[in-house]
Amino acid sequence: MTPTEIRAAFLEELVSVAPDIDPDSVADDDHLQDDLELDSMDFLTLVTAIHTRLGVDIAEADYPRIATLGDAVPFLTERMG
């Protein structure tokens, strides 16, 4: 899967968790919780959705590595490689 496909998958899962978010308005440096206002339950739901969709285990210690779209794409690309 390419980084572009991972980015699209991440955004689709993000919008499924938080339907009020416009995926076209999400910047690479928008923090999921601070800027996009995901609460902790939404964040965990997103982690689960990413795991189910991409088959990537994301340990709690790695949560900061998916805190923004710009951080998540290279992290997930590395894990899927």
Image: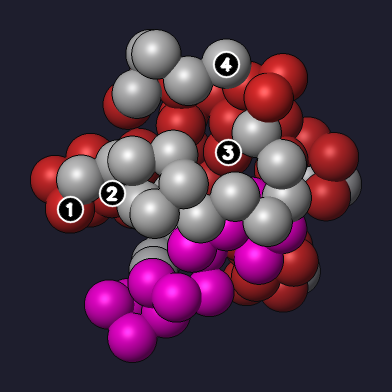
Whole-percent x, y for residue 55 in the image: 47, 52
Q: CA distance from mark 4 to mark 1?
A: 20 Å
Give the numbered dot on residue 56. none
**Badge nearest the viewer, 1 or 3:** 1
Sequence-wise, which precedes: disc 1 or disc 3?
3
Q: Are marks 1 and 2 in contact (CB under 8 Å)?
A: yes
Whole-percent x, y for residue 28 in the image: 73, 50
Q: Left or right: 26 with respect to 40?
A: right
| Residue at figure coordinates x 65%, y 33% from the top left | 26
Q: Left or right: 46 with respect to 72?
A: left
Q: Amino acid at mark 3?
A: Phe
**Alpha-carbon neighbours of circle 3 within 10 Å: few (<14), some, or many (≥20)?**
many
Whole-percent x, y for residue 47 in the image: 34, 52
Q: Which residue is mark 4?
A: 22
Q: Which residue is mark 1?
A: 40
Q: CA distance from mark 2 to mark 3?
A: 12 Å
Q: Secondary structure at mark 2?
A: helix
Q: Amino acid at mark 2?
A: Phe
Residue at the extreme bottom of the image, as rendered = 61
Q: Which residue is mark 2?
A: 43
Residue 23 drawn above or below residue 76: above
Give the numbered dot on residue 10. 3
Q: Secondary structure at mark 3?
A: helix
Q: CA distance from mark 1 to mark 3?
A: 17 Å
